Amino acid sequence: MAESLNLHDVRLTLPAQSGPVEILKGVNLKVEPGECVAVIGPSGSGKSSLISIAAGLERITSGKVELLGTDITGMSEDALARLRRGRVSLIFQSYHLLPTMIALDNVRVPLEISGIEGVKDKATKLLQEVGLGDRLDHYPGQLSGGERQRVAVARALASDPEIVFADEPTGNLDGDTGTGVADMLFDIVQKRKTAMVLVTHDRELAKRADRIVTMRNGNLEA
C-alpha cells in the first residue's frame, strides 16, 4: 500500500522585498496509512508551510509531493480538488466555521458539496460523537471555543478521510479544553485508522503521536 504522504527533497522559496526567502530546504517525510506524525519546532520554522504544501494548498519550488499515492507536484487545481474530495481533511487553529450556519449545517454542507449521501445522519452522528448532540442547532457565535473546534473536527472527519492535516488544532484553547479536544481527535482518528499530520507547539500533545519530527530553519529532523 502506498504511503499516505511522501515528500521528497521538497523546497519552497518565496519572494520578499529583501530577496527570495527559503522556507523549506529539501524536506523529506513519509507518513504511512493510519500513522500519526507530529511536527514540532519554533515559530517561523516552516511548520505551517509544510502542511500547506503537503495538502496541495501551496505549490513547491522543487522536489516531489505524493499524496495518497498520487504525484500532485504539477497537478491542476481541478484535479487536486477531485483527489482531496472526501479523502483529505484539514483542521485549523481558527476553526473556519461559517457564522451564519448552525453546527449541523457547518458539518453537513461540505459533505453535500462533496457528493456524499446520507449527510444529515452522518453530520448528526459525528456531532454526537464529539459531545455536541445537544448543540446541533447552535450557531458558532453561541458556542465556546472548545465547542467550535469540536464542530471543526466533526466536519473534518465526517467524510471518513484517509489523511487529516491538523495545524495547531488546540492552539486557541485553554489547557483543559485543549486536552479534551485532543482526546477526542486522537480517539476518532485512531479508531478509524486515519493518517494524521499534526503541527503543534505543545510537546505533551506531540508525544501522543506515533512519531515526532522537528522543523528547524526549513529542515526536518527526526
Image (spheres, rainbow, N blue to C red):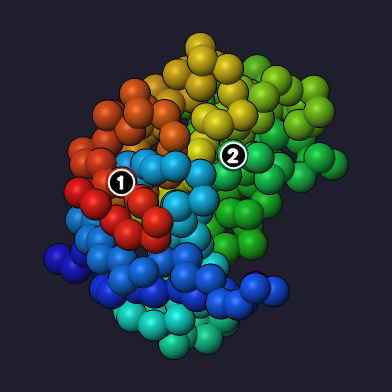
Q: Which mark is residue 214?
A: 1
Which mark sits nearer the N-terminus, 1 or 2?
A: 2
* Front position in the image: 180 or 109: 180
- Report whether residue 85 is seen: no
Q: Residue at x 81, y 40 (%)?
A: 99
What amino acid is at disc 1? Thr
Q: Which mark is residue 93?
A: 2
Secondary structure beneath dot 2 equals: loop
Figure quadrant of residue 133:
top right
- Residue 165 in the image: above or below residue 113: above
Residue 43 rendering spot, x and y as whole percentages: 51, 44
Residue placed furthest toward the left? 1
- Residue 7 in the image: above or below residue 62: above
- Report whether residue 2 is seen: yes
Secondary structure beneath dot 1 equals: strand
Figure quadrant of residue 150:
top right
What amino acid is at disc 2? Gln
**The N terminus - image quarter:** bottom left
